[in-house]
Image (spheres, grey):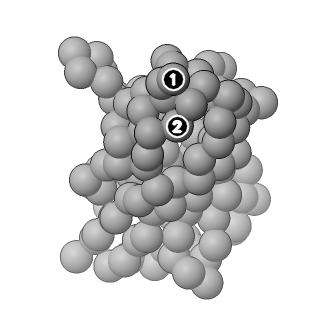
Amino acid sequence: QVQLVESGGSLVQPGGSLRLSCAASGFPFSNYAMTWYRQTPGKERELVATITSDGDGGSTNYADSVKGRFAISRDNAKNTVYLQMNSLKPEDTAVYFCGVRRLGVAYWGQGTQVTVSS
């Protein structure tokens, strides 16, 4: 079965950096686009960044709010997708999830908490 396990969330000061990881299993990882989302209480889940499969060019797409600060990447040998987050702001505080859509079904991990505060 599809499993996604996020890690790397932490408390960080404004201006700091974090790298989130999402380890995937149960599906042919290299063939699928992967997405990072985030959610804060009372708000809808927000798409943060997407990376397509290498077969589709490995292209990336970002929410306007994180462009130039965040970078998504993937390591197909490790079945892992990353989110490098730089110049973090308090408004980046959220639970971050990775997701994949396979055969019409959306899968999510349990999320990892990122808190940006001094």
- In the image, residue 67 sits, relative to residue 91, either above or below, namely below
Place of residue 104 in the rendered image (x, y in percent of width and height, measured from the top left): 30, 53
* Res. 97 visible in picture: no
Residue at x 34%, y 64% (from the top left corner): 5
The structure residue drawn at horizontal position 69% and vertical position 68%, both measured from the top left corner, is 55
Toward the front, the furthest residue is: 118
**Pointers 2 and 1 in contact (CB under 8 A)?**
no
**Where does residue 19 sit, x and y in percent of width and height?**
59, 53
What amino acid type should be assigned to the residue bearing mark 1? Ser
Point 35% across, 48% down: residue? 112
* Residue type indicated by callout 2: Val
Quarter of the image with the N terminus is bottom left
Q: Is residue 41 visible?
A: yes
* Vertical relation: 36 (above or below) 13: below
Question: Which numbered tag is attached to residue 118?
Answer: 1
Give the residue at mark 2.
12
Q: Where is 91 relative to 22, above or below?
A: above
Residue that appears at 31% across and 24% down:
40
Q: CA distance from mark 2 to mark 1?
A: 8 Å
Element class at badge 1: loop
When the figure is inspected, residue 10 is found, relative to residue 34, above or below; the finding is above
Q: Residues within 10 Å of mark 1 (few under 14, many from 20)?
A: few
Secondary structure found at label 2 = strand
Q: Which-is-in-front pick, marks 2 and 1?
A: 1
Query: Which quadrant of the structure image shows residue 45?
Result: top left
